[in-house]
């Protein structure tokens, strides 16, 4: 550890706990938005590390691409899906969570000690040489000479990603399937169709569930208040008994 | 600042790659500009023409041994042989993918974005399948060809992603049992992304160790390092995780049965034949070019992996009741046999491995082609109990499947025997006696489920609901004939292909 400056050490010891805490928080947080923000913390700290370690380009890319583009996309998706769509916490495989934690910690320990042993006495070398022409030009030189084919073939990856997004997310309506506003209105007021919204479920002192049919003034059931999805049924005694959910 | 010079690129040597990728790009344009009714009729000939052109280009550069594009690509014997195998198996896969006679509209869903089980999903059940699968197939095959030729770790990683991403997508596009197919795709995607991360971390550590990404540079650095360097071994371990996952070796095999079962059967065939071939192409290059000199350090662990793969695959295959899962576990065990050839670390081993991969690929594609034909009203009848008595209903197809099963079991005069003989004799030549013994035991165990299917087909009475064997269309018939001819041909006269593999068995660099 010959040429680590004091400034770099200070930055490291401040930001390393932040990065690590963010990573753990991201996995542990129940709320998806909190998770995303924890991840932003980790990403930003890593970006600073890269800059401090003379990798200006990758540091900036980290902030722009990961923290900027990917995390914002992530938050957009969360907003679309709904913030409170929380995970189900049922373990499908018994003991899987515990085994995963133990194995994860074991693997992290193994890798960390291995890296500490492997990198503990390494002198940094060649950093000035590769950054001699500037960080960005040096990366450009590698990218467009040694790795030019890999760079070009990444386009196949991007095309595949775009194609995949279209295939998995885009529903194409054919002509005839697509109804115009005029056709919708006509259909709504056509004979045989009831233009007003359907009646809601019945709200009574005894029950207000969606499965409760609304009653007409003559106490017959209003057919239009029934849904196809939820069928009317009587609750069994076990289901009707108090569940104790009001107590803490 | 000095001027940058693009490294010289031997375009003739990489023409096969460019042709396959080009067919994919043109296919995307076809999706965009050709009317829907014409797309299928344009896409299939386009992709097949691209692959045939690639095969011709490969034959015309068969004698090339160059490292090009700044050392990123090694167009050497194994790369060319494996690329040839990939293109040939790819053509057969495309024939299966393009089949639209057996199931109305093909094995692929018309619009994957429609929620499964809804009214609009039922409405699209008779519409022709999505034609995006053809460019996706082209990109997958192109990525695999690149994977076999990649001469540094970065190019290899990019190739890994290029061929994985289309496969994740293709898995999700089954026409029947769509939720199962989507589940398979998500599983494959998540685990695949995880294994790619391992691969990438391994690449980073190896770069940290050697200061270079090229396999030749790694070999030189590893030879100097001795057996003390933690970075090197952590790097090899992580890299192996990524590679073994793609080859479906124990303990990284868990995704295989679920994904093979859920994916549309033509795609399953492609994964069993082409993906396996590509993965082993990468493994061969990494371990023979990169780390052969320090083999004593990593070989014991990988021998254990190979033994576990052979045993777990064979034993689990015995317990299966679904033909696709059975073939999945059999493909796991077969990965173990292929790996014995890799561990021989000799030119003989390389040749045996490559021969095995090509021979196995043709047989497994034909087997999955038969699976697509055994159907009832709900689609493919994959449960083994439904196959009972099939031999009396359709003697021709049962006979065909029997030949394929016997080839899997390694009966002489089939390709299964010659290929197993090739890898095991190479392993014996390298004094890997344990591996060969375990391989033989595992083959014996694995013969049981194969023969059980055969017995089930012939010795049981056909039930009322025994499914019918659909009449195959031109494409599937062609695939079946190619598969059968290759299976028997490589068993009776393996000489020419084996010789070709031996001539092509030395890596450059």
Image (cartoon, coloured by chain):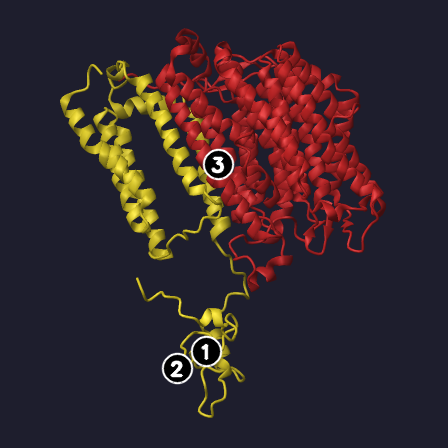
Chain colours: A yellow, B red
The quadrant holding residue A84 is bottom left
Task: Label 2: state its secondary structure.
Answer: loop
Quarter of the rendering containing residue A151: top left
Task: List x then y, in percent, for residue B165.
Answer: 49, 38
The subunit carrying tag 1 is: A
- Check if mark 1 and mark 3 are on a common chain: no
Mark 1 and mark 3: span between their CA atoms? 47 Å
Residue B496 percent location from the top left of the image: 73, 17
Q: Are marks 2 and 1 in contact (CB under 8 Å)?
A: yes
**Subunit of label 2:** A
Say above or below: B481 vs A163: above
User: Mark 3 falls on what kind of element?
Assistant: helix
Judge left or right: residue B244 versus residue A52.
right
Chain under numbered label 3: B
Q: Which residue is mark 2?
A: A204
Looking at the image, tell me whether mark 2 or mark 1 is earlier in sequence order.
2
Question: Closer to the camera, B140 or B201?
Answer: B201
The residue tagged 1 is A212
Pointer 3 residue: B192
Instruction: From the viewer's side, name the closer residue of B288 and B299.
Output: B299
- Specify whether residue B378 is in view: yes
Neighbour class for label 1 at 10 Å: few (<14), some, many (≥20)? many
Disc 1 element = loop
Classify mark 3: residues with Cα within 10 Å, few (<14), some (14-19) or many (20+): many
Cα separation, mark 2 vs mark 1, equals 9 Å
What residue is shown at x 20% (from left), y 14% (from top)? Answer: A2
Discs 3 and 2 lie in a common subunit: no
Res B61 visible: no
* Residue plotted at (65% across, 21% down): B438
**For residue A236, above or below residue A224:** above
């Amino acid at each position: 550890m010959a040429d680590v400056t004091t400034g770099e050490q200070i930055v490291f010891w401040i930001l390393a706990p932040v990065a690590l805490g963010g990573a753990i928080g991201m996995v542990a947080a129940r709320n998806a938005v909190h998770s995303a923000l924890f991840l932003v913390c980790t990403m930003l700290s890593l970006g600073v590390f890269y800059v401090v370690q003379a990798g200006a380009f990758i540091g900036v890319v980290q902030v722009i691409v990961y923290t900027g583009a990917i995390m914002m996309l992530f938050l957009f998706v969360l907003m679309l899906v709904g913030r409170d769509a929380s995970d189900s916490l049922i373990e499908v495989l018994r003991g899987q969570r515990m085994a995963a934690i133990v194995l994860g910690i074991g693997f992290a320990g193994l890798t960390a000690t291995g890296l500490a042993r492997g990198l503990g006495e390494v002198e940094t070398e060649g950093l000035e040489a590769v950054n001699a022409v500037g960080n960005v030009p040096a990366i450009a030189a590698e990218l467009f000479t040694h790795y030019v084919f890999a760079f070009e073939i990444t386009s196949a990856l991007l095309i595949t990603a775009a194609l995949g997004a279209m295939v998995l997310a885009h529903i194409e309506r054919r002509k005839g399937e697509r109804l115009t506003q005029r056709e919708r209105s006509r259909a709504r007021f056509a004979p045989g169709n009831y233009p007003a919204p359907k009646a809601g479920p019945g709200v009574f002192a005894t029950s207000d569930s969606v499965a409760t049919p609304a009653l007409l003034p003559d106490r017959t059931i209003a057919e239009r208040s029934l849904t196809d999805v939820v069928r009317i049924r009587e609750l069994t005694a076990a289901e009707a008994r108090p569940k104790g959910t009001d107590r803490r | 600042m000095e001027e940058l010079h693009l490294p010289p690129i031997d375009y003739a040597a990489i023409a096969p790659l460019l042709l396959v990728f080009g067919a994919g790009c043109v296919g995307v344009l076809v999706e965009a500009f050709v009317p829907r009714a014409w797309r299928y009729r344009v896409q299939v000939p386009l992709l097949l023409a691209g692959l045939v052109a690639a095969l011709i280009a490969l034959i015309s550069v068969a004698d090339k041994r160059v490292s090009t594009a700044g050392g990123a690509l090694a167009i050497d014997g194994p790369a060319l042989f494996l690329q040839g195998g990939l293109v040939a198996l790819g053509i057969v896969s495309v024939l299966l993918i393009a089949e639209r006679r057996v199931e109305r509209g093909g094995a692929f869903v018309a619009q994957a974005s429609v929620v499964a089980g809804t009214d609009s999903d039922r409405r699209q059940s008779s519409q022709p399948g999505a034609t995006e699968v053809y460019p996706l197939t082209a990109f997958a095959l192109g990525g695999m060809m690149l994977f076999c030729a990649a001469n540094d770790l970065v190019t290899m990683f990019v190739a890994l992603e290029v061929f994985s991403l289309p496969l994740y997508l293709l898995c999700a596009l089954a026409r029947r049992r769509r939720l199962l197919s989507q589940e398979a795709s998500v599983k494959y995607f998540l685990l695949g992304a995880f294994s790619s991360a391992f691969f990438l971390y391994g690449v980073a550590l190896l770069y940290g160790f050697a200061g270079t990404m090229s396999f030749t540079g790694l070999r030189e650095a590893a030879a100097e390092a001795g057996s003390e360097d933690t970075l090197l071994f952590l790097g090899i371990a992580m890299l192996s995780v990524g590679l073994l996952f793609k080859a479906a070796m124990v303990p990284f095999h868990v995704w295989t049965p679920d994904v093979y079962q859920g994916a549309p059967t033509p795609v399953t065939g492609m994964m069993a034949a082409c993906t396996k071939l590509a993965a082993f192409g990468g493994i061969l290059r990494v371990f023979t070019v990169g780390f052969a000199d320090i083999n004593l350090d990593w070989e014991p662990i990988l021998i254990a992996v190979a033994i576990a793969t052979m045993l777990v695959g064979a034993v689990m295959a015995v317990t299966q009741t679904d033909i696709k899962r059975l073939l999945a576990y059999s493909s796991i065990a077969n990965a173990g046999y292929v790996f014995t050839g890799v561990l021989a670390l000799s030119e003989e081993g390389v040749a045996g491995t490559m021969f095995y991969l090509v021979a196995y690929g043709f047989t497994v594609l034909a087997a999955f082609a038969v699976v697509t034909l055994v159907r009832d009203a709900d689609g493919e009848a994959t449960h083994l109990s439904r196959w009972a008595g099939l031999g009396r209903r359709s003697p021709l197809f049962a006979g065909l499947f029997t030949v394929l099963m016997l080839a899997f079991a390694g009966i002489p005069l089939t390709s299964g025997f010659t290929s197993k003989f090739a890898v095991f004799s190479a392993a014996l030549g390298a004094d890997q006696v344990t591996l060969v013994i375990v391989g033989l035991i595992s083959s014996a165990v694995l013969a049981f489920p194969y023969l059980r299917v055969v017995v089930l087909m012939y010795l049981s009475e056909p039930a009322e609901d025994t499914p019918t064997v659909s009449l195959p269309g031109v494409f599937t018939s062609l695939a079946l004939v190619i598969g059968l001819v290759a299976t028997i041909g490589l068993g009776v006269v393996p000489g020419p292909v084996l010789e070709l593999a031996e001539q092509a068995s030395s890596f450059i660099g």
